[in-house]
Image (cartoon, grey):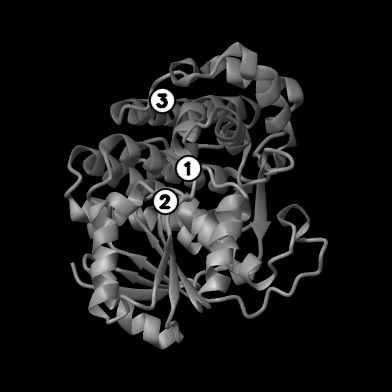
Amino acid sequence: MGITAFSFPTRTLYGAGALRELPANLQRLGIRRPLVVTDAGLARTDAFAALVATLGAAGRDRDWFVFSEVHPNPIEDDVRRPAAVMREHACDGVIAIGGGSPLDAGKAARLLAKHPHASLSRFYDEGLDWSGLAPLIAIPTTAGTGSEVGRSSVITLDGTKRKAVLFHPELLAKLVILDPELTVGLPPKLTAATGADALTHCIESYTCPSFHPMCDGIALEGVRLIVEALPRAVRDGRDLEARGHMLVAAAMGAVAFQKDLGVVHSLAHPLSSICGMHHGLANALCLVAGMKFCAVRKPGLYRRVGIACGLEVQRVPEAEADARTIAFVAEFLAGIGLNTRLREHGVTEAHLDALVAQAFEDPCHQTNAVPVALGDFRALYLEVL
């Protein structure tokens, strides 16, 4: 596998060993004192050791710094603290490495490094100048969120204890490195959960009613790649082709969901903020129920998703095309170990009122394929509980 470079719009380096191109790109971007943002778990991995070796080989062992305390679901402190480190050490760029959480934290830290007294809960209202943020290099070590190519950052706010989305084009990375060698150490369960996140992004963005045919095409090709590659990556973590295809598919899902998402994400977000569940797992456990809910109200919605999955559903009735596609997705998730119930992950009926309230207030379902009422959320949670 050679190294491929492309832009859409973020410049992306793809291929095994692409990390070795980092020093030249730091120089190209004028970054001399980067801050590396990651989490404690990733800091103990071979992927992080590879980054350290690459930065050291570039003669930067005295000129780069690390913040490695990002939470699995990032909170305000995960943005404010690295921003303070950036100011303290006069860092002129950020290298965010890991899953979606450190990537989101690294994106947003650049804003607070420039505006240390800004309120994340009121950043739209404060008329902040977004120009001139320190450049970001994003290096995902999971294939799920696609945060590396996104212009948003999802942070749980102190005041509300709910996830909020910071959104601005200036949050985009200046460079993305998709190196499958950095994902080989990801355990099978996390490979499955993050991959299911990417699958959910592709399906929900495609079925979102907003008009964006380019995103529709990207989403459907993302589905095809995931269906082919994810079981292989779960089965054999050293399958670099499968790992690489999953990295690309995750990025495609994130590009596609600029259309917006749907009810599954509104169900999943509170499961993370209230119950601490991994976002990809939450999406996986809610996906089939969400698809069934939409299909009943809008027959034929999933025909082209089924075709992308490799199913022969071109000429069957709409309801049958949906049923076959949903059955395939359910079997696919079960095949990679994602057919458990919410209760097996600590969610109880005592959580329902809070979950329903937050899900209804979550904006993702406002762009769902069909309308979702307050009572629908309770029924959907009970279906997967």
Residue type for callout 2 = Asp
User: Going by the image, does 58 lie left or right of 38?
Assistant: left
Which residue is drawn at the image coordinates 83% and 61% (left, top)? 125
Amino acid type of the residue tagged 3 in the rendering: Ala
Q: Which residue position is annotated with label 1?
A: 72
First along the sequence among labels 3 and 1: 1
Q: Secondary structure at mark 3?
A: helix
Q: Earlier in the sequence, mark 2 or mark 1?
A: 2
- Rendered location of residue 37, percent (x, y): 45, 61
Secondary structure at numbered mark 2: loop
In the rendered image, which quarter contains the N terminus? bottom left
Write down the residue under mark 3: 327
Asked whether disc 2 touches disc 1, contact meaning CB atoms under 8 Å apart, the reply is yes
User: Residue 217, can we see it?
Assistant: no
Q: How many numbered tags mark residues here?
A: 3
The three-letter amino acid code for the residue at tag 1 is Pro
Q: Measured along the vertical axis of the image, is residue 40 above or below residue 111?
A: above
Vertical comparison of 309 with 20: above or below:
above
Residue 172 location, x and y as percent? 55, 68
| Relative image position of residue 96 (x, y in whole percent) | 44, 63
Which residue position holds label 2? 39
Tag 3–tag 1 contact (CB < 8 Å): no
